[in-house]
Amino acid sequence: MLPELTQERRRELVRMARRRAEDARVSIRNVRRDAQSMIREIQTEGEASEDDCKRASKSLQDLTDAAVGQVSDLLNNKEEQILA
């Protein structure tokens, strides 16, 4: 049997979850930055048209927004579980 969590311990767990969520967001943004630089490199080398690169950048941003939103949703759910 595990004892009930104290309110202080619950707040500490929420802080840890928020910190990990922020780390995940930073990782997502780092991947986006690397992908954007690859897209720019492809465009400057002339391997793809400017329109294709713009579409790829928009698609990349949409994927990034979706991933960050998913992290936020998971964090909200986890906070509710911890505080309940």
Image: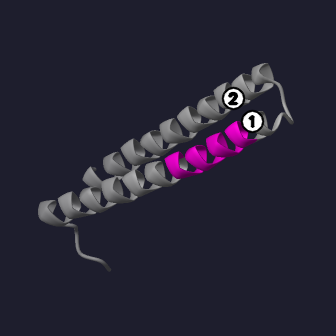
Amino acid type assigned to the residue bearing label 2 in the image? Ser
Front disc: 1 or 2: 1
Q: Residue at x 82, y 25 (%)?
A: 49
Q: Residue at x 56, y 41 (%)?
A: 67
Question: Would you call the spot at circle 1 few (<14 residues within 10 Å), some (14-19), or many (20 or more)?
Answer: few
Q: Nearer the viewer, residue 3 or 51?
A: 51
Inter-mark Cα distance, 1 to 2: 19 Å
Q: Residue at x 69, y 29 (%)?
A: 59
Q: Which residues are magenta?
A: 29-41
- Disc number placed over residue 59 in the picture, else none: 2
Percent x, y of residue 48? 84, 31
Q: Give left or right: position of 60 versus 48.
A: left
Amino acid type assigned to the residue bearing label 1 in the image? Thr
Q: How is the image coloured?
A: one colour
User: In this picture, is 6 found above or below 48?
Assistant: below
Asked where in the image residue 39 lies, by quadrant, the reply is: top right
Q: Residue furthest front?
A: 45
Q: Nearer the viewer, residue 19 or 55?
A: 55
Residue 37 part of the magenta-drawn span: yes
Per the image, label 2 sits on a secondary structure element best described as helix
Q: Residue at x 19, y 66 (%)?
A: 9
Q: Which residue is mark 1?
A: 44
Q: Earlier in the sequence, mark 1 or mark 2?
A: 1
